[in-house]
């Protein structure tokens, strides 16, 4: 089990050497017209340690170039490349939502090819064995974006959480193009609960956002798909972005044909609300369906009129009759044709992989909140459209970029790049961030091999959702604002110390993961190595190994009990809970 | 199985571990505050209870009524034990208004829930470049020096998420509990003290090793939280959270509901020496049917809890050292909308203050006859924060410094609302 070694960390210096060497070789080649084979060999070696590897993917090359340009503007030197095992942990957490298993770490360590990272990314994205986990991870992420962590968890909610997740899981598993997802969500009609006639899980996005003429649907649509914060403009012009109150209501007018009503829950024992989302003719607040207008109120009490008009000023016929104009269909087209839509999703995904987007927050874009890398953002937006809105392509470009491969260790050359103090991120080192609760949950299942015996999908998700409930804090507003206590504070630390999840993960009952390790015939050292790899993707240091050995001694031959102490300690460490 | 490293005895090993476990102690730095006036901080034992009305309460229907005006709504004013009138549906609070004052000239600009919550908690408008600490974290940070014996986190949030610690760091984050005082996972499960000790020693090796790699502040924050968690788990101060041990009479005084229990819990935490407690009571976002909702649901709960808290604190001699603040993120529109509701309104609204360092019985400032504007000097979140700091003896000269070197004056340089300062 010594497949584990670290790649050299002095790559930057080496790559400079290699760069010089390459330049010399190239010059030589030009002068003496050396035949190709003569230079190919050294060039291949050179590119192996080349820092700006782009894997032959132009978008990756462009990211590297634009990110480097900002470094050189600010005189920043990037951190060295992260060691392979830590990079692997990072990409597993971000792409499929859990840490890699010991087997997966070892398999990667055996591959020394220069293409090894690309192969891993492609495997996580395209290999059948990761399809379910990929879909699960992005379903969690998107569920939280679309309906939050709390919606659908009690029977007063018009949302069916499982229905929302079913729609997302199907879409993610098939890698449905993003514009199609937007269209599904914005135009959805049908019933919200799996098993109902006319089921369409996508309707759950809007079902809890239709009160008060759909102001929340308006705000969320702009925020999620266009990266625009417009909720303030419901009542007045925005204090600092260019949005005006009339724009809000013109956007809102697209939602006035939308209705929701109660349906029959197919499960007679369930007291959850079954709902249906439909379109119906809108008579207009003036009572004329051929010119169906809406009214809104200015601060001074004056009423103004509004018709459906997209954020860029494009409008549609004013008829409220669904047979003539389906307003949400038109809205979806506007969104998907806009320049903002691909930029908003690029920004959101970039934020997912780096902890910071090009704007903060990722869904508040515009002239008032300038992007840190405007050209890169715009370029990636265009490329994303050209790739037919393929989310997996976007993930591939980001995860194979140089910036994503850098160590989280801060060096002298980049200590000023510190977004935690409000500096705009330069992505010159990887930024530490906490695992999400969902990632912790899934990681523990895999680290302890419990994923091999988990129940059916719905059952698993229900269990996880139940566990997640302890972290939700809801604020008392009609907009359903919420936060999580899984944020690195004491309640989380207590859960990690004493909670059932950790108790199960560190159980030494017969058949448990640790009991298995202890009796597998492996000597103590191997078992300790295994725990370290499973939890933090590295082997113990000499000091740590000595300490672990002393624990073994103190347990007088009860290996399982000692391993339990060690694993508990590892799971409670910063090195485990932080994505680094 | 010979696992013993050569030349290493058990004794040597334990001392090695002991050295490693020192990590969460002296090597830590606590924040970057420049303390301009250390003397001010020596004042002992002050606390603040913030009653947070999430959603934006209709202060025009509670503390600044406009009978007869088109905007006046359905409620009538009644006289109180102070020099002001308040809503008829707050009769118990009316009797203790000699301890509470209403600031009627709050005038702010943030009428969105998220932005308003942030602004009223921090004194700053949201800024993508900077996360500002909430009032609770600031007070905790500034008074913690006097409370070295306190194991309970110095800012406790009952039932709400409050606002985070911003640039002060996660160590100053509000500790969130529900109104029953339940602290989840507090009890060690199948782990005795000796086992915990051994595990913590092992843990500290990994933890410290990672901090030393200089990967950013999150690693150190985690270490600090670990230490606080260990303190909490092993402290008998945690009995302050056992609000269920209060007598039925006491529960009745505050009201047998979540907000009442939350306020009662806050009093217990004040007794335990916690400098800042926020108690959340949401559900004020009354865009429709506002008068029935207020009369039948919201006001009776507030009336019972608020009066109960004042009476109880006074009887225990704690009121003079406990500053009370009642507020939400904004008020509600004077104009009543088509659904008999009121919408978001920040231009002219009220907050209530009282107790330690505050004069009671006053109405400070005034709004116009319709309640749509402020006729006297307008007050802001910064002003209110500065006033609370002064009432608690926290120096307004305090300046925080972010790592990027930007100086940030406490309470965003707000001006004192002198009329209410005792």
Image (tube, helix red, strand yellow):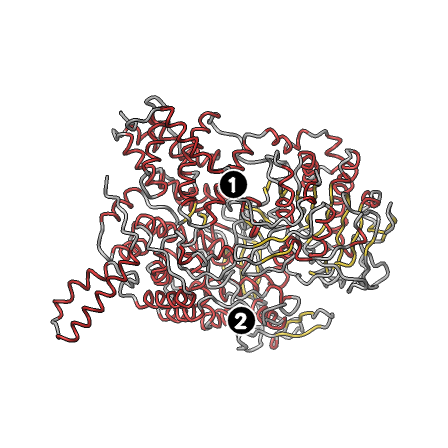
Residue A37 % position (x, y): 12, 67
**What is the quadrant of residue A261 in the picture?**
bottom right
Q: Nearer the viewer, residue B71 or A471?
A: A471
Label 2 sits on a secondary structure element that is loop
Between tags 2 and 1, which lies in front? Answer: 1
For residue A107, above or below residue A402: above
Neighbour class for label 1 at 10 Å: few (<14), some, many (≥20)? many
The chain containing the residue under callout 1 comes to B
Which disc number belongs to residue A367? Answer: 2
The chain containing the residue under callout 2 comes to A
User: On the image, numbered disc 1 is attached to which residue?
Assistant: B225
Label 1 sits on a secondary structure element that is helix
Give yes or no for contact between labels 2 and 1 (Cβ–Cβ under 8 Å). Answer: no
Residue drawn at x 33%, y 67% is A59
Residue A548 % position (x, y): 35, 31
- Residue A171 visible from this viewpoint: no
Neighbour class for label 2 at 10 Å: few (<14), some, many (≥20)? few
In the figure, is residue B302 to the left or right of A262?
right
For the N terminus of chain B, which image quadrant?
top left
For residue B35, above or below residue A335: above
Residue A495 % position (x, y): 49, 37
């Amino acid at each position: 089990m010594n497949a584990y070694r670290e790649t050299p960390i002095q790559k930057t210096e080496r790559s400079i050497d290699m760069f010089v060497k390459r330049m010399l070789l190239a010059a030589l080649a030009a002068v003496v017209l050396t035949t190709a084979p003569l230079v190919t060999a050294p060039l291949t070696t050179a590119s192996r340690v080349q820092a700006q590897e782009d894997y032959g993917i132009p978008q990756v090359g462009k990211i590297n170039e634009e990110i480097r340009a900002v470094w050189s503007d600010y005189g920043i030197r990037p951190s060295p490349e992260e060691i392979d095992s830590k990079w692997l942990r990072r990409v597993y957490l971000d792409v499929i939502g859990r840490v890699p298993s010991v087997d997966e770490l070892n398999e990667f360590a055996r591959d020394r090819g220069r293409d090894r990272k690309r192969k891993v990314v492609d495997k996580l994205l395209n290999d059948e064995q990761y399809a379910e986990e990929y879909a699960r991870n992005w379903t969690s992420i998107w569920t939280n974006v679309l309906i939050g962590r709390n919606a659908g968890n009690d029977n007063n909610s018009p949302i069916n959480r499982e229905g929302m997740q079913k729609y997302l899981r199907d879409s993610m598993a098939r890698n449905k193009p993003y514009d199609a997802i937007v269209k599904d969500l914005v135009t959805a009609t049908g019933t919200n609960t799996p098993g109902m006639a006319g089921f369409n899980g996508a309707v759950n996005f809007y079902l809890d956002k239709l009160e008060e003429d759909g102001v929340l649907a308006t705000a969320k649509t702009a925020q999620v798909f266009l990266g625009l914060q417009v909720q303030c403009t419901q009542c007045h012009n925005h204090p600092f972005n260019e949005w005006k109150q009339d724009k809000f209501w013109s956007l809102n007018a697209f939602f006035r044909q939308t209705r929701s009503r109660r349906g029959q829950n197919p499960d007679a024992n369930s007291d959850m609300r079954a709902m249906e989302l439909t379109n119906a003719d809108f008579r207009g607040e003036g009572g004329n369906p051929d010119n169906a207008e809406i009214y809104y109120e200015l601060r001074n009490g004056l009423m103004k009129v509004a018709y459906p008009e997209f954020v860029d000023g494009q409008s549609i016929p004013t008829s409220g009759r669904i047979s003539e104009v389906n307003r949400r269909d038109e809205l979806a087209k506007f969104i998907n044709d806009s320049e903002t839509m691909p930029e908003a999703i690029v920004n959101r995904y970039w934020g997912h992989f780096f902890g910071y987007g090009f704007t903060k927050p990722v869904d508040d874009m515009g002239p008032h909140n300038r992007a840190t890398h405007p050209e890169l953002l715009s370029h990636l937006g265009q490329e994303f459209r050209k790739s037919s809105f393929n989310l997996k392509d976007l993930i591939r470009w980001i995860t194979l970029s140089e910036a994503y491969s850098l160590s989280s260790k801060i060096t002298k050359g980049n200590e000023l790049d510190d977004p935690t103090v409000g500096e705009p991120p330069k992505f010159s080192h990887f930024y530490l961030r906490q695992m999400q609760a969902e990632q912790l949950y899934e990681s523990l299942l895999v680290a302890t091999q419990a994923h091999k015996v988990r129940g059916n999908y719905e059952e698993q998700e229900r269990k996880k959702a139940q566990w997640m409930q302890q972290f939700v804090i809801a604020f008392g507003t009609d907009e359903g604002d919420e936060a999580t206590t899984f944020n690195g504070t004491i309640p989380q630390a207590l859960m990690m110390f004493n909670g059932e999840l950790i108790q199960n993960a560190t159980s030494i009952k017969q058949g448990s993961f640790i009991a298995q390790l202890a009796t597998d015939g492996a000597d103590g050292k191997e078992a300790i190595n295994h725990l370290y790899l499973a939890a933090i993707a590295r082997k113990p240091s000499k000091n740590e190994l000595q300490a672990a050995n002393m624990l073994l001694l103190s347990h007088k031959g009860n290996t399982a009990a000692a391993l339990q102490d060690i694993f508990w300690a590892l799971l409670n460490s910063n090195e485990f809970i932080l994505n680094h | 199985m010979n696992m013993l490293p050569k030349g290493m005895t058990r004794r040597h090993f334990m001392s090695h571990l002991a050295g490693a476990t020192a990590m969460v102690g002296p090597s830590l730095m606590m924040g970057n505050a420049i303390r301009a006036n250390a003397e001010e901080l020596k004042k002992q034992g002050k606390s603040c209870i913030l009653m947070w009305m999430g959603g934006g309460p209709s202060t025009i229907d509670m503390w600044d009524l406009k009978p007869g005006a088109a905007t006046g709504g359905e409620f009538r004013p009644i006289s109180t034990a102070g020099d002001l009138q308040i809503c008829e549906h707050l009769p118990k609070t009316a009797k203790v208004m000699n301890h509470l004052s209403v600031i009627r000239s709050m005038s702010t600009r943030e009428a969105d829930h998220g932005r308003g919550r942030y602004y009223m908690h921090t004194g700053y408008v949201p800024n993508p470049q900077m996360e500002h600490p909430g009032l609770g974290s600031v007070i905790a940070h500034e008074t913690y020096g006097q409370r070295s014996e306190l194991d309970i986190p110095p800012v406790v949030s009952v039932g709400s998420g409050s606002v985070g610690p911003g640039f002060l760091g996660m160590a100053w984050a509000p500790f969130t509990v529900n109104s029953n005082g339940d602290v989840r996972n507090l009890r060690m499960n199948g782990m005795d003290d000796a086992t915990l000790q051994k595990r913590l020693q092992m843990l500290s090796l990994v933890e410290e090793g990672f901090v030393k790699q200089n990967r950013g502040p999150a690693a150190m924050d985690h270490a600090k939280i670990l230490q606080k968690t260990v303190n909490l788990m092993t402290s008998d101060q945690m009995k302050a959270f056992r609000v269920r041990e209060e007598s039925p009479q006491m529960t009745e005084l505050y009201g047998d509901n979540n907000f009442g229990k939350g306020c009662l819990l806050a009093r217990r935490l004040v007794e335990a020496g916690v400098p800042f407690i926020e108690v959340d009571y949401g559900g004020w976002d009354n865009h429709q049917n506002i008068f029935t909702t207020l009369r039948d649901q919201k006001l009776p709960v507030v009336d019972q809890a608020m009066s109960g808290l004042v009476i109880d604190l006074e009887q225990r001699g704690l009121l003079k050292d406990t500053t009370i603040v009642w507020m939400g993120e904004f008020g509600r529109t004077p104009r009543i909308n088509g659904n008999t509701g009121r919408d978001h309104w920040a231009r002219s609204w009220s907050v209530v203050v009282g107790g330690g360092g505050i004069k009671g019985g006053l109405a400070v400032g005034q709004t116009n006859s319709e309640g749509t504007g402020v006729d006297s000097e307008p007050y802001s979140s910064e002003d209110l924060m500065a006033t609370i700091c002064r009432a608690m003896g926290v120096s307004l000269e305090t300046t925080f410094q972010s790592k990027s070197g930007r100086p940030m004056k406490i309470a965003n340089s707000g001006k004192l609302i002198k009329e209410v300062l005792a």
